[in-house]
Image (cartoon, helix red, strand yellow):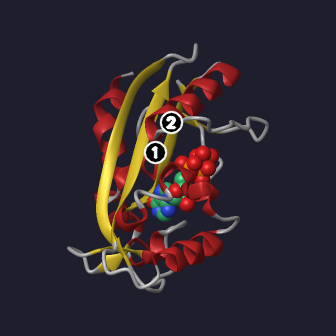
């Protein structure tokens, strides 16, 4: 059976593909034509919106990810607006660092909700994954994407951008959400 990976974000796509490869799905990429407005106020709403809409438009099963970075000292910002915080990854990182300034409380978490929709658009399963960390004062590492170079995980003493893809996947918000969906992804 075919499964459309409903994301336009190349970084997410790589991580989702790495996880889904080897399962019994023929992975399809999201056709360019589908542009979805993320009108939801929560990660769950937006993940379901994207999965539903892509399933309906393509007539295939679809899997979508809505994710973002919540910073405690910024009252949870950028949160669901993480992608809209700047035009490029560099701009988003710069804005976040300047808004945080010399704030001592640098606690943050990545949140990811992944939703799966069947061809008629009905959501059949969703799962959330969370990864706690803190925001560095300057970027470190060159792997990953998005806010990875400033997101530091104390247990590993590494930023997401300093980890291998396997290492990031094993503890990231996205890895945890995907892992929670594994039984369903195997048996659908
Ligand atoms: P799609 O909606 O097409 O999937 P998007 O980039 O617009 O792509 P989101 O609305 O879910 O997706 O925005 C999530 C943003 O949060 C993303 O653009 C990154 O800036 C950030 N983000 C999410 N997961 C991340 C990760 O693992 N590492 C770094 N940044 C991440």
Q: Earlier in the sequence, mark 2 or mark 1?
A: 1
Q: Position of residue 53 (x, y in %)?
A: 63, 26
Question: Which one is in front in this view, the residue at disc 2 or the one at disc 1?
Answer: 2
Q: Position of residue 43 (x, y in %)?
A: 46, 41
Q: Residues within 10 Å of mark 1 (few under 14, many from 20)?
A: few
Instruction: Name the element at disc 1.
Output: loop
Q: In this view of the protein, can residue 116 be seen by the observer? A: yes
What residue does disc 1 label? 21
Q: In this view of the protein, can residue 3 be seen by the observer? A: no
Instruction: Name the element at disc 2.
Output: helix
Q: Which residue appears at 70% of the width and 23% of the height?
A: 57
Q: Which residue appears at 58% of the width and 78% of the height?
A: 94
Image quarter where the C terminus lies is: top left
Q: Is mark 2 within 8 Å of ligand 1?
A: yes
Residue 3 in the image: above or below residue 17: above
Taking 59 as reference, is 82 left or right? left
């Amino acid at each position: 059976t075919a499964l459309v990976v409903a994301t336009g974000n190349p970084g997410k796509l790589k991580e989702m593909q790495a996880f889904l490869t080897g399962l019994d799905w023929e992975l399809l990429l999201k056709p360019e034509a589908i542009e979805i407005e993320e009108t939801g106020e929560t990660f769950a709403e937006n993940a379901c919106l994207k999965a539903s809409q892509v399933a309906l438009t393509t007539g295939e099963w679809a899997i979508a990810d809505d994710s973002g970075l919540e910073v405690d000292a910024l009252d949870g910002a950028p949160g669901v607006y993480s992608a809209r915080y700047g035009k490029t990854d560099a701009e988003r990182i710069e804005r976040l660092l300047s808004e945080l300034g010399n704030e001592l409380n640098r606690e943050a978490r990545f949140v990811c909700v992944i939703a799966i929709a069947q061809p008629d658009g009905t959501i059949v399963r969703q799962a959330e994954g969370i990864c706690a960390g803190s925001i560095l004062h300057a970027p470190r590492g060159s792997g990953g994407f998005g806010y990875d170079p400033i997101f530091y995980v104390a247990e590993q003493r590494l930023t997401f951008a300093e980890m291998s893809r396997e290492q990031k996947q094993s503890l990231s918000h996205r890895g945890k959400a995907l892992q929670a969906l594994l039984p369903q992804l195997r048996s659908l």
